[in-house]
């Protein structure tokens, strides 16, 4: 953690070297940074432009896209399964507990996909779009530097709502449960603390604040609990607007749309918005040292967020001739009809 006093250039170099080294771990086909260099070099400019447009339209879109990559990777690996809608064969992961009325910005992913299909048809997978859109979103919100994105994932032919319900963490998980949940996908405590820092941007439904942070005294800072109850999410009967949309508040009340270290500063004040946030500070252990380090050393947080995101992006991808390159992120490619297959 000595990088704190180095300049951004040094950190950028360090990120690149560390991550290139990471990619060579394990003998099998690995994701690479140059995967689209010949087939779709425009991927960088196209995704950046689409992300920039979407975030300018609504700042929250940055947070929503960072979360999509996470919710894709934790469920049978980073294979774009989260993006699939219902089919006759399976129910979409979009209806899983952690995603329903919550996961969003699918329309932005569709715009990115359309722009990429126009420039380089049938080339860029939806799973890879989630990885680069997540990076560009975090950067758009303030993350520095521009860490390298690894590519080569292919898209799943199916999705599993049961796996999404089993493997996406809940806001009332204890520290031990969070640790196990991350260990299940080869992520450690440092990854848990660093990736949770994504909650420095984005929104949470007041319904969940009342259900988890205000229920059962899971939020133990009574002053902050009163503030949440009376000022931030008042009126328990009004969780939804007349149009049916849910009332939300900020996950980082200080700088809601800025990717910075205030999430960790909030935790140290006992002001984590959801119990799974506050427990990262309240549980005794090495976690408290990580929280303290990230609270005061943005360079360390940004570096570790990049490293842990790359690691998360490596969770059992489909590669080579596995899966497919979806033409529409929302549905598996049409298969050859049986009648034609028989001929
Ligand atoms: C450690 C376990 C985690 C739990 C229990 C958790 C839980 C939650 C919950 C309950 C919300 C609010 C959802 C809603 O009210 O609709 C949320 C939002 C969010 N989460 Fe997490 N999360 C975790 C880790 C992560 C990780 C690892 C990332 C990304 C690296 C992430 C990124 C986000 C973002 C950006 C939002 C805001 C999304 C938006 O505004 O659309 N979370 N999370
Ligand atoms: C998808 O399936 C789920 C579960 O059966 C259902 O609740 C939902 O309404 C379906 N969505 C659409 C758009 O048909
Ligand atoms: C966490 O919340 C779920 C409801 O979403 C509930 O079924 C479960 O019992 C809760 N777990 C704990 C440890 O409170
Ligand atoms: C970890 O994985 C096991 C086996 O799939 C599962 O039963 C368990 O619920 C997972 N733990 C958490 C906390 O997600
Ligand atoms: C929230 O405020 C209401 C009304 O003032 C009160 O009845 C309730 O006990 C409060 N809940 C918590 C968890 O503080
Ligand atoms: C709570 O709801 C009531 C009735 O809808 C309204 O009069 C009151 O102003 C609301 N309080 C706050 C703090 O929003």
Image (tube, rainbow, N blue to C red):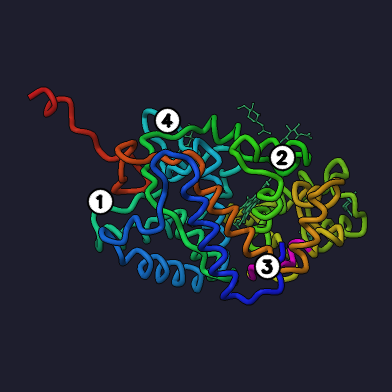
Disc with the residue nearer the chain's start (3 vs 4)? 3
User: Image quadrant of residue 39?
Assistant: bottom left
- From the viewer's side, name the closer residue of 281 and 249: 281
Whether the magenta-drawn stretch holds residue 160 is answered as no
Q: Which residue is mark 2?
A: 179
Q: Which residue is mark 1?
A: 122
Q: Is residue 196 above or below residue 157?
A: below
Q: CA distance from mark 3 to mark 2?
A: 26 Å
Q: What residue lies at 59% left-to-right and 34% top-to-bottom? A: 165
Disc with the residue nearer the chain's start (1 vs 4)? 4
Residue 77 position, x and y percent, is 49, 39
Disc with the residue nearer the chain's start (2 vs 4)? 4
User: Image quadrant of residue 183?
Assistant: top right
Q: Which mark is residue 90?
A: 4
Q: Which mark is residue 3?
A: 3
Q: CA distance from mark 2 to mark 4?
A: 30 Å
């Amino acid at each position: 953690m000595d990088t704190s006093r180095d300049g951004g250039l040094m950190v950028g170099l360090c990120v690149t070297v560390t991550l290139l080294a990471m990619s060579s771990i394990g003998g099998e086909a690995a994701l690479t940074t140059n995967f689209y260099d010949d087939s779709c070099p425009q991927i960088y400019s196209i995704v950046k432009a689409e992300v920039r447009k979407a975030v300018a339209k609504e700042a929250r879109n940055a947070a929503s896209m960072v979360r999509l990559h996470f919710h894709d990777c934790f469920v049978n690996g980073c294979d774009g399964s989260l993006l699939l809608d219902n089919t006759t064969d399976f129910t979409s992961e979009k209806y899983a507990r952690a995603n329903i009325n919550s996961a969003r910005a699918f329309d932005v992913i569709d715009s990115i996909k359309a722009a990429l299909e126009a420039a380089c048809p049938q080339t860029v997978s939806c799973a890879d779009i989630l990885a680069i859109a997540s990076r560009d979103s975090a950067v758009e919100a303030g993350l520095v530097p521009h860490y390298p994105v690894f590519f080569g994932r292919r898209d799943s032919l199916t999705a599993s709502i049961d796996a999404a319900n089993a493997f996406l963490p809940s806001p009332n998980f204890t520290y031990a449960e969070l640790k196990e949940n991350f260990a299940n996908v080869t992520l450690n405590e440092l990854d848990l603390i660093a990736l949770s820092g994504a909650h420095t941007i984005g929104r949470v439904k007041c319904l969940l604040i009342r259900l988890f942070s205000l229920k059962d005294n899971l939020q133990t800072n009574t002053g902050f609990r009163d503030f949440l109850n009376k000022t931030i999410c008042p009126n328990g009967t009004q969780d939804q607007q007349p149009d049916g949309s849910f009332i939300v508040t900020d996950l980082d009340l200080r700088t809601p749309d800025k990717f910075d270290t205030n999430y960790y500063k909030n935790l140290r004040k006992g002001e984590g918005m959801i119990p799974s946030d506050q427990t990262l500070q309240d549980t005794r252990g090495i976690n408290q040292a990580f929280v303290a380090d990230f609270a005061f050393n943005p360079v360390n947080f940004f570096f570790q967020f990049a490293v842990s995101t790359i690691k998360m992006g490596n969770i059992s991808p489909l590669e080579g001739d596995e899966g497919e390159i979806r033409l529409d992120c929302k549905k598996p490619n049409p298969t050859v009809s049986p009648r034609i297959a028989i001929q």
